[in-house]
Image (cartoon, rainbow, N blue to C red):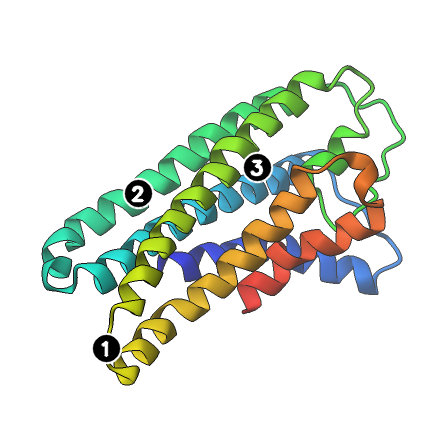
Amino acid sequence: LTLGLIDMSYASNSVPKMLANLVSQKRTISFVPCITQIFLYVAFAATECLILVVMSYDRYVAICHPLHYTFIMSWRVCTVLAVTSWAFSFLWDLVHLVLILRLPFCGPHEINHFFCEVLSVLKLACADTRLNEIILCVSCVFILLGPLCLVLVSYTHILLAILRIQSGEGRRKAFSTCSSHLCVVGLFFGSAIVLYMTTKSSHSQEQRKILSLFYSLFNPML
């Protein structure tokens, strides 16, 4: 439910304006809606990273400790984990927002992207953006690489537990429990890491625009 809510919010933040721009000759967005779009875009992305970790832990407990599942993953624990993920992501995103608002934008005012994506907007600033880029890099380490490592650790334990299951039916049920989550994890983390943690020269702007669609449109649709 929480992941579905995030994905709907994530898509609703950028897709309506993106579709409007595709059918309209006047493709403009004012400063405040653009900054709001950046804030929500980064906040929802960070929240999804953390929720995917929580979901991988949930799968780990369900498969590796099924008899203790209702005790470990109680309604109270799930609520605390979900609320903490949302709160941390939005508070951390405020740092990005403040750093962007301090920058002067003196033209050209044309964003080479489908929506107000943070890197594309930073290119329009007529001031030093190194601090923004450093904070973005630190965010990628803690919000992308950190959660991805935790997900991989969870699924390593899950895989070992599945291999110990004797019945073929039990293995199929365990794999079906994890397959959709693994698919989302691979698409989301893979595209985000390629986009934000590789050198700028590695991919053209057009390739980066297509990659951004994977986690802003295709993932929520999936």
Q: How many labels, in total?
A: 3
Amino acid marked by disc 3? Phe
Amino acid marked by disc 1? Gln
- The residue identified by callout 2 is 83
Where on the picture, by quarter, is residue 132?
Answer: top right
First along the sequence among labels 2 and 3: 3
Circle 1 packing at 10 Å, graded few (<14), some (14-19), many (20+), is few
22 or 213: nearer the eye? 213
Circle 3 packing at 10 Å, graded few (<14), some (14-19), many (20+), is many
- The residue identified by callout 1 is 166
Measured in 3D between alpha carbons, the distance from the residue under mark 2 to the one under mark 1, in whole angstroms, is 38 Å
Instruction: Give the residue furthest to the bottom.
Output: 169
Amino acid marked by disc 2? Val
- The residue identified by callout 3 is 39
Circle 1 or circle 3, nearest the eye: 1
152 or 1: nearer the eye? 152
139, above or below 12, in the image: above
